[in-house]
Amino acid sequence: MAKAIIFDVSGVLTDDDLPSQVEAFAESHGLAFSTAWEAIDIMNYSQAAVGAKTPEEMHRTAVSRMGIDMSYDEFVSMHRTAYRVRPEMIGLVNALHGQVRLFVLSNQTTLSAAILRPIIDPLFEKAFYSNETGMKKPDHRFFRLLLEETGLKPEECIFIDDKIDNVAGAWELGMKAILFRGKESLIRELQSLGISV
């Protein structure tokens, strides 16, 4: 019987629509979407997800690459409006309280973690964010950090993520791992693992 369920955030507990926000921003500034997306996303996020870039540095890098004026507040607002909590998933998490221990293990930047923490963290025993640890999924060290701090064994955990590489990382360590495809599918898979939902 599982003792804990570990949730990813982006793409599982939230709908993340940063591409649409970037597209609207690009149109309003006369930029190609690909130019704006590359400037805002690629290197910025890979570095920021392990805490190597602050939100201010992310902003400066994006503005420099695009060659346009964009205030820091506009940059933050674009990110803030990109995250939408899935009410049905929050309901599912609430239904699991008292059955198993609940945790978050999520790749986030300092900016996205600051946006999400007030909404997500109160639902869980503890949330582990990549920007605070210098490690991100599917790095086994990130999973092991959670196990060490919680006293759990891999076989006692169910891990849920929408990215196959992250699911594979958890599975390689001995966790039961579920690729998220939606609430109803997740409920069926949890039930097959002995969780009452």
Image (cartoon, grey):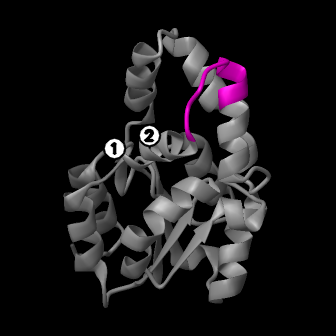
- Percent x, y for residue 178? 44, 55
Image position of 164 (left or right of 102):
right
Mark 1: secondary structure: loop
Indicate the amino acid at tag 2: Met
Indicate the amino acid at tag 1: Arg
Residue shown at 21%/60% (left/top)? Answer: 87
Using the image, tell me which numbered label, if any, was put on residue 181: 1
Q: Which of marks 1 and 2 is nearer the N terminus?
A: 2
Image position of 112 (left or right of 62):
left
- Percent x, y for residue 92? 24, 68
Q: Residues within 10 Å of mark 2 (few under 14, many from 20)?
A: some
Whole-angstrom CA distance, mark 1 to mark 2, is 26 Å
Indicate whether 27 appears above or below 102: above
Question: Picture quarter containing residue 99?
Answer: bottom left
Q: Is residue 30 magenta?
A: no
- Percent x, y for residue 166? 60, 49
Mark 2: secondary structure: helix
Q: In which quarter of the image is the N terminus?
A: bottom left
Q: What stretch is highlighted in magenta?
A: 63-71
Using the image, tell me which numbered label, if any, was put on residue 78: 2
